Amino acid sequence: MIFERLAAMLNKVIAIDGPSASGKSTVARKVAAGLGYQYVDSGALYRGIAWKAAGMGCDPAKSAEVVAAMGRMKVYFFVEAGAVRYRIDGIEPRAEIRTERVSEQVSWVAAIPEVRAQVTQWLRNMAGLGDLVMEGRDIGTVVFPEADAKFYLDASPEERARRRHAELKPAGETADVNRVMDSLKTRDQRDSGRKTAPLKLAPDAQVVDTTGLSIDQVVEQILRRLRGNG
Ligand code: CDP
């Protein structure tokens, strides 16, 4: 226990926050690989809880139901292939947490203070597992306000909708680009407007506008800034 606490204090954390489809996941994964750190997708945990709670018959808008269901979930974390991953009740959810249905439900679930408190605790404990690049909405503001470096990725709403639309197509989802843009807008509003840990720019975060930049250009920019020559 003491060793884990000490390791958590010594390990480094790079926080990458920003709105939906700003490119965080791909960028954060590549930055982590470039640094030899572990990648953490905090949104995948909120998605996993929303998906599992719905599977247990909960209405995601009913906080008490979701909190009770979360208390019955057994969540287990492990490090593999450069990332901290998790299983809920023995299952590692993948494509099933990326559907539009889960995307619509997750921002309700993520607005529940008890859910946030539990997920924040899990995320903080991960610092005992190694150096981390963690992406989300509140990593630099709430989860690790003392992070070694903080980035805030953004892009125009049109570009973000185009990116998300392109991701959904291979997954077999057929939403048109305008519907995707509406759904992103609704989720952004809920994420920025909620009382607990809303999406906002940390005063000490470096902003990267990814509109018109390739993933590799963004990754390069972040790595250069981390090396102190950006
Ligand atoms: O990839 P995408 O931008 O669609 O979102 P995500 O990172 O998978 O996160 C899904 C949802 O989880 C967000 O819309 C937020 O409601 C919530 N979330 C959060 O509240 N705090 C985080 N640190 C990460 C995600």
Image (cartoon, rainbow, N blue to C red):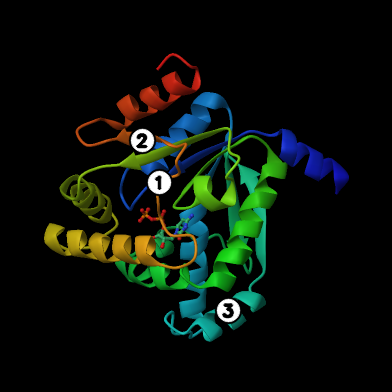
Q: Residue furthest right?
A: 2
The residue to which callout 3 is attached is 67
* Residue 48: x %, y % from top left: 50, 65
Report the residue at 50% width, 73% height from top. 112
**On screen, residue 214 above or below 229:** below
Which is more N-terminal, label 1 or label 2? 1
109 to the left or right of 122: left
Instruction: Identify the amino acid type marked 1.
Output: Leu
Under tag 3, what secondary structure?
helix
Q: Callout 2: few (<14), some (14-19), or many (20+) C-alpha neighbours within 10 Å?
A: some
Measured as percent of width and height from the top left, residue 188 is found at 31, 60
Give the numbered dot on residue 12.
Answer: none
For ligand 1, which image quadrant applies? bottom left
Three-letter residue code for mark 3: Val
Say whether residue 103 is visible: yes
Q: Residue at x 26, y 56 (%)?
A: 168
Query: Which corner quadrant holds the C terminus?
Result: top left
The amino acid pointed to by label 2 is Val
Query: Residue 207, which numbered label?
Result: 2
Disc with the residue nearer the chain's start (2 vs 3): 3
